[in-house]
Amino acid sequence: MVCVALGCMPAAATFAAPPVHATWTALPIREVTGQLSHLAGRPVVLDRRIDPTTPLTLVITGESCDDVLATVAARAGGQAIHLESVIRIVPPALAGRCLAGEQARRREISRLPSPQRDSLAKKATWQWPPGSTPRDLIASAAAEAGLAIDGLDRIPHDHFPAADIPPLTLADRLDLILAHFDLRVGWSRSPTGPHPQGHIVPLPDAAADAVPTDTEPTSPARRNSPPRQVGGRQVYTLRLEAPLEEALNAVTRQFGLRLSLDTASLSARGVAPREIARAEVRSASRDELLDAILVPLGLSWRIDDGTLRVWAEQSPR
């Protein structure tokens, strides 16, 4: 049986993780990641190819949570990848594919009609008993949400240990399982009904420049790098955790745009201009960067005459 260690934690907080002070002596990595989940504010997920019983002996004195995660991952022969809702510790060769898969999901969901986007954005907890099979977990989650997902036979047979996952969107929950097998759900518009069509597909290949190789600590608020040219197009790297309006003002200045934020429509959908926006992209286009910031909040955008217009579409009654 392959073990998959999933750190459990309460709902994600909006504050920065405090410095870590800890002493671990021959502690299995699955227990370490469980502790780090609480500090990071997101589940820390061990890829099924990382041995969860790997013993770790570390003395941590005031280091950042990001630094500790990088060290823990390296000791286990992996790499910590900061995704939108989870942190995955994966074999280094898979890091770029995980990031590329998340960017592909954001693009696909952003193109769906509002009701179909909303059906994937609903958050819920997820628990399962020991011995559960990934195929059954995906099938039951999809059926409960009223979704039909093609390609379930592509999921290999396996058994997972018990898990208790904090609230995540449906799209995140499905990909959390599938990424263990280098798979994800590809989403497309359904011509009828409130739900999109889902197809299980391989994680996309990542361009060499998109694979993160640094372990430099990052600010909990915002870190970005100047645009550069890759394959004839301008790309951006950004890690963001800041109030939405502040973040949009910063990126529009970088893009040479004006900002028009429809606060009335945001308020009607329960999104405040001061709500914390989180995003992490590498080697992303301008459109992919904006999708990364806005799509997780259920917001739409377009650029007209040098102005970035951001609004929230209203759910049909």
Image (cartoon, helix red, strand yellow):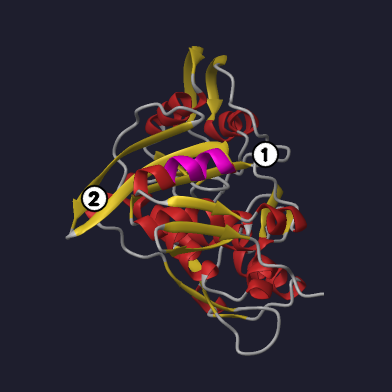
Q: Which residues are magenta?
A: 245-251
The amino acid sitting under disc 1 is: Ala
The amino acid type, in three-letter code, at marker 2 is: Asp
To which residue does mark 2 refer? 209
Which quadrant is home to the C terminus?
Answer: bottom right
Give the answer, above or below, for where 252 lies relative to 315: above
Does 248 appear in magenta?
yes
Q: Nearer the viewer, residue 134 or 111?
A: 111
Of the numbered discs 1 and 2, the one sitting upstream in the chain is 1
Q: Position of residue 294 (x, y in %)?
A: 55, 55
Task: Pick the residue in front: 170 or 162.
Answer: 170
- Residue placed at 48% from the left, 48% from the top? 47
Task: Bin the neighbour count of mark 1 within 10 Å (Cα to Cα): few under 14, some 14-19, many 20 and up.
Answer: some
Relative to residue 300, is residue 272 drawn left or right?
right
Q: Which mark is residue 12?
A: 1
Relative to 64, is 84 above or below? below
10 Å crowding of disc 2: few (<14), some (14-19), many (20+): few
Which quadrant would the N terminus be assigned to in this image?
bottom right
Side of 18 where 90 appears, left or right: left
Task: Label the magenta part by its dominant secondary structure.
Answer: helix
Considering the numbered disc 2 on the image, is that residue within a helix, a strand or a loop? helix
Q: CA distance from mark 1 to mark 2?
A: 30 Å
Q: Horizontal and vertical percent for residue 15?
A: 63, 29
Which is nearer the eye, 185 or 32? 185
Residue located at (36% from left, 43% from top)? 254
Residue beneath the point at 40% across and 48% down? 281
Is residue 32 magenta-colored? Answer: no
